[in-house]
Image: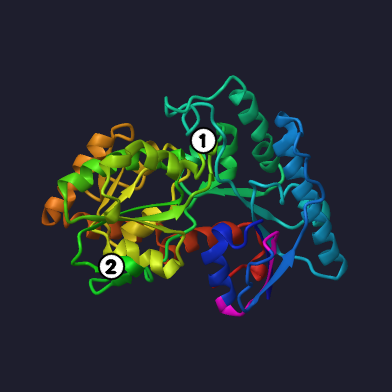
Amino acid sequence: MTRILLVHQNMPGQYREMMDALRRTGEHDIVFLTQRREAEAPQGVRKVLYRPHHRPAEDAYGLARVWAEAAGAGYGAALTCQALRDLGWRPDVILGHTGWGELLFLKHVWPDVPILGFFEYYYLNHGGPVNFDPEDPSDATAPYLLQARNAVPNANIHAVDRGTCPTLWQRDTFPEMFHPRLYVAHDGIRTDRLRPDPDVALELGRAGRVTRRDEIFTYMARNMERTRGFHVFMRALPDILAARPEARVLIVGGNEASYGRASSAEGGFRAEMEAEVGSRVDWSRVHFLGRLPYGDYQRVIQISRCHIYLTMPFVLSWSLLESMAMEATVVAADVAPVREAVRHGETGLLVDFFRPDLVARQVVEVLENPGRFAHLGPAARRHVVEHYDFETVCLPQHLAEINALLPEDRHVRV
């Protein structure tokens, strides 16, 4: 029986599918180290909570704050792992996210245990979301703050035996000296579970029931914010609704700030953009659904005639690939990480992030002539199945890299 330690402050994070695949065999001793108290451990997984050893004060020095948080998380994780060690438990391999520091000191606990770290993003002053949108310029401190944030991945590359990045674009945000230690393989999409459904229906409460017969277009992000192009979507919305009087839009996501600065407006960025487009929108056809259970989110995409995915150059969202797997006709921002997954006119439609008018025009064309674009959804699904499917593509890649760190008699098998 192979003993596996999974580490992510927000269980399960990027290990959702990996954890499920490992536990289903019944042949592995799996411990998940996390801060997330409310997370439920599935059968076959033992959840172990750790507490950060230190949290910086609210007025902590800005250039040191992220490192202080990471060091506190790392030491807290190490102390909890020491307790596991003292009880006689030793993993054969450790898989964990590097972003919050939990992996930093684990070699002091188990010097000979291989660690495979998930490297998500290296903070860039140019080439990522910072300094991308002229409406949201960075201030003079940004280069210093970003370099200070990168102390965490810079330390982690020395704390792990191997690293993984989900996309080539994300790998290339890291300095070239990292690249020999990193391999590229996505977390994986369960295309066997994510499929189109012509008979799908969704209840919208007082707004009624919608099906594929309704003219529905959609937008989704974890939170409605600039990094995910919410302002561009909202500026395109009046023209789309005016051109398509029967169309309705379903908007999925929260109203907080995951990336970048929060809006100063009361009611957040959603309220700020509602005020800007104001009287130009027929709000009776706009449905903000908030954050949804996963099954309802799937139904939203399956109903959609056109799904809008807007992002600055940043970490590629699972939702894009999931939407493609469900054969959505996607209108997406023409930025480098999206171009890695979407080919214009073949698997989706790419538009200039800075041109809400072009976003609106493209969405209207799809809604007016769905047959003209009907080939895009099936082609998008084929592309995701070929390159991002968890069970047939991504899982074998990850297992090969994990097992290269282990003696044959401890290999991880599913």
Q: Residue 409's image quarter? A: bottom right
Is 363 located above or below residue 24 in the figure?
Answer: above
In this rendering, is residue 102 above or below 135? below
* Residue name at image x 64 percent, y 72 percent: 41
What residue does disc 2 label? 196
Query: Which residue is at 52% across, 41% downward?
Result: 266
**How far from the left and from the top, in percent, is residue 135?**
42, 27
Q: Residue at x 44, y 43 (%)?
A: 271
In this figure, which residue is indicated by the disc labeled 1? 173
Of 75 and 241, nearer the camera is: 241
- What's the magenta region? 24-36
Of the two numbered discs 2 and 1 on the same chain, state the one appearing first in sequence: 1
Of residues 398 and 313, the one drawn nearer to the viewer in this rendering = 313
The residue at 59%/62% (across/down) is: 12
Q: Is residue 58 visible?
A: yes
Judged from the image, the secondary structure of the residue bearing numbered disc 1 is helix
Quarter occupied by the C terminus: bottom right
In the rendered structure, which amino acid carries the disc numbered 2? Pro
In this rendering, is residue 82 above or below 309? below
Q: Are marks 2 and 1 in contact (CB under 8 Å)?
A: no
Q: Is residue 345 visible?
A: no
Residue 396 pos. (x, y %): 48, 63
